[in-house]
Image (cartoon, grey):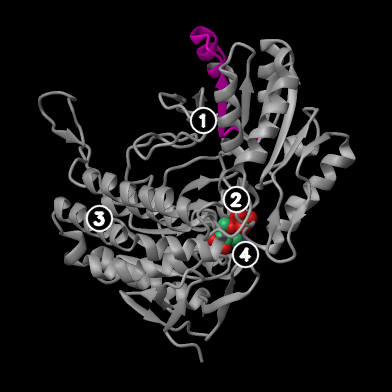
Amino acid sequence: SLPLFKELVAPNGLKINQPLGLFINNEFVKSKSGDTLSTFNPTDESEITAVYAADSADVDDAVAAARAAFYSPSWSEINPSQRGQLLYNLADLIEKNTDLLATLDTWDMGKPLSVAKAEDLGESVAVLKYYGGFSDKIHGKTIDVGPSKLVYTLHQPVGVCGQIIPWNYPLVMATWKLGPALATGNTVVLKSAEQTPLSVLYLGKLIKEAGFPPGVVNILSGYGKTAGAAIAGHEGIDKVAFTGSTATAKVIMKAASANLKNITLETGGKSPLIVFDDADLEQAVKWGHSGIMSNMGQVCTATSRILVQDTIYDKFIQEIKVQTEKVSVLGDPFSEATFQGPQVTKQQYERVLSYIEAGKAEGATLVCGGTKHGDKGYFITPTIFSDVKDHYKINQEEVFGPFLAIGKFSTEAEAIKSANCTRYGLGASVFTNNITKAHRIAAKIEAGMVWINSSQDSHYAVPFGCSFDHIPRFSHVGLSNCDYPVFIRILKIARSIIV
Ligand code: ADP
C-alpha cells in the first residue's frame, strides 16, 4: 500500500519529502478504507503521486481530534499572545520553505513559479502574521443598563470549524481560512481540493513544527462528494467555511443546516471592468489584461467582462490585443519567462474550450486566442471576444479561464445597467480620471468590492467579497464573498500603477 511519505523530485529538480497521509492529531495516517486519490501535473498530464483520501470515517476521527483539542488546556487555556506566536512561527516556517511550497503549487496546479513565490507565498506569510497580531486584540463590550447590573459581551470561539478550499490558490486559501480561525481559538478540520493536495499536506508538517498542540489543525485530502460532504453535514462541526463554486455552495448550505452550522461561503463572480473615455487608456489596458489573464483566469474576482465607452472602443480593443500578445507568454510554469501556464485540469480546460465555442456560436467577434496550445498539457491561448451583448452566455456565466468578454456602452446609465446584468456581485472596476464620476458609478455597481483605476488590488487587511464583518468575529472564521446582497461596500482606489 501507499507509504506515508515519499521522496518526490519536482520538474525543477527540487527534492521534496512529501507527506501522503491524512494529517490528524499532528500525525500523518492512512485513510481507514485505504482509499487514495491521484494528483496530476497539468503541464504534461503525468501523475505526480497518489495521496490518501478521506471519507466519512476519517472525517469522524479528525473531528474527534479537533473536539478534544478544543477543550484541551494546551489550546483552550493558552494565553492569546502565545496563540498569536504560534501563527508567527507558522508564517516564519512557510517563509523558510518558500521554494518548496511554491514548487508544489506550480507542479500541482500550473501557476508560474515566479508568481507562486512572489504572490502566493508572500500572501500566505503576510496573512498569518496579520491574524497572529489579532490574537491578543479581541475586545468585548460593556453595556450600561443601569446601576444595578453589569452587562458585558464576551467573545469566544465557535468550536470545531470545517474548512473546504478550492484549487486555484491552494496554499493561500488554506492560510486565509486558518489564520482567522486559529487567531480566535477555534480548532480546524480542513479539506484541500482533490486537484491540489500537495502544498496543503506539507503545511501539516509545518503546523506541527510551529508548535500547535495535536488536533488543533487537521488536514484531509479527499473528494467533495465524500470527505467534503461529511464535513458539511457533520454534527460535531460548529461552523463551515467554504470557497468554491456557487453550485457546491448551495449543496453545502443545505447540508450545514443539519445542525444549523454557522457558514461562510465564498463563491463565484463575473466581475465587470468599466472603461470611460476620460480614463488613462494605457493603465486601463494593463489592468484590464492582468485582471482576467493572471492565474490563467482562475480567480473568483477576475474582471472577466470589460465594458468600454463607444468613443474609445476600437482603440481599446486594439491595444488590449497588443498587450495580451506581448505579456501573456504561454509555456512551462517553471520557466521564468512564463506568464500563463496550463488550466488546472482536463475538465476545466474542456470547460473553457466549450465557452469559446459558445462565444463563436452566439455571434461575438473573436479578437485573439480561441484555440488550444501545444499537444501536451491543458494550455489555452488567451482569448478575447468583443461585441459581446449583455444576454450572451459568455457574458452571464463564469468561465474561470483566460477568457475576456468585451462589450460596448455609450452612456453612464448603460454602463451601470450592463455592469449589473448578471446574477453575480463580487468585484468590479471603474476606470475614469473624473473623481466625482468614479465614486458615483462605484456606488451604483452591485458588487462587494469596487476598484477605481485598478483590478484585483486586494490586501489581507481589507475585507474581501461582500462580507458582513471583516474583523475575525468568532462566528466568522472565513473571509467571505458570495452572491448575496451587499452589506459592506469596499472601495479601493489605486495608488499603484502598472509600469
Ligand atoms: P470547482 O468547480 O472550482 O472545483 P467546487 O465547488 O466543486 O469547485 O470545489 C471546491 C471545494 O469543494 C473542493 O474542495 C471540493 O472537493 C469541495 N466539494 C465539492 N463538492 C462538495 C460537496 N458536495 N460537499 C462538500 N464539499 C464539496
Residue placed under numbered mark 4 in the picture: 43
The image shows residue 331 at horizontal and vertical percentages of 62, 56
**Residue at the bottom extreme of this rendering:** 1
Residue that carries the numbered disc 3 in the rendered image: 87
Circle 2 SS class: loop
Residue 212: in sight, yes or no?
A: no
Near-viewer residue (173 or 16): 16
Is label 1 within 8 A of ligand 1 (CB to nearest ligand atom)?
Answer: no
Residue where numbered disc 2 is placed: 340
Residue at the disc numbered 1: 448
For the residues bearing labels 1 and 4, Cβ distance under 8 angstroms: no
Q: Residue at x 53, y 9 (%)?
A: 434
The quadrant where ligand 1 appears is bottom right
What distance separates the C-alpha of mark 3 from that of mark 4? 34 Å
Could you tell me how far apart the alpha carbons at marks 3 and 2 are, in whole angstroms? 32 Å
Q: CA distance from mark 2 to mark 4?
A: 11 Å
Compare marks 2 and 4 and give the one earlier in the sequence: 4
Q: Amino acid at mark 3?
A: Leu
Type of amino acid at the residue the image marks with label 1: Gly
* Residue numbers of the magenta segment: 424-442
Which mark sits nearer the N-terminus, 1 or 4?
Answer: 4
- Marks 3 & 4, CB-CB < 8 Å contact: no
Total residue callouts: 4
Q: Residue at x 15, y 58 (%)?
A: 78
Q: Residues within 10 Å of mark 1 (few under 14, many from 20)?
A: many
Label 3 or label 4, whichever comes before in sequence order? 4
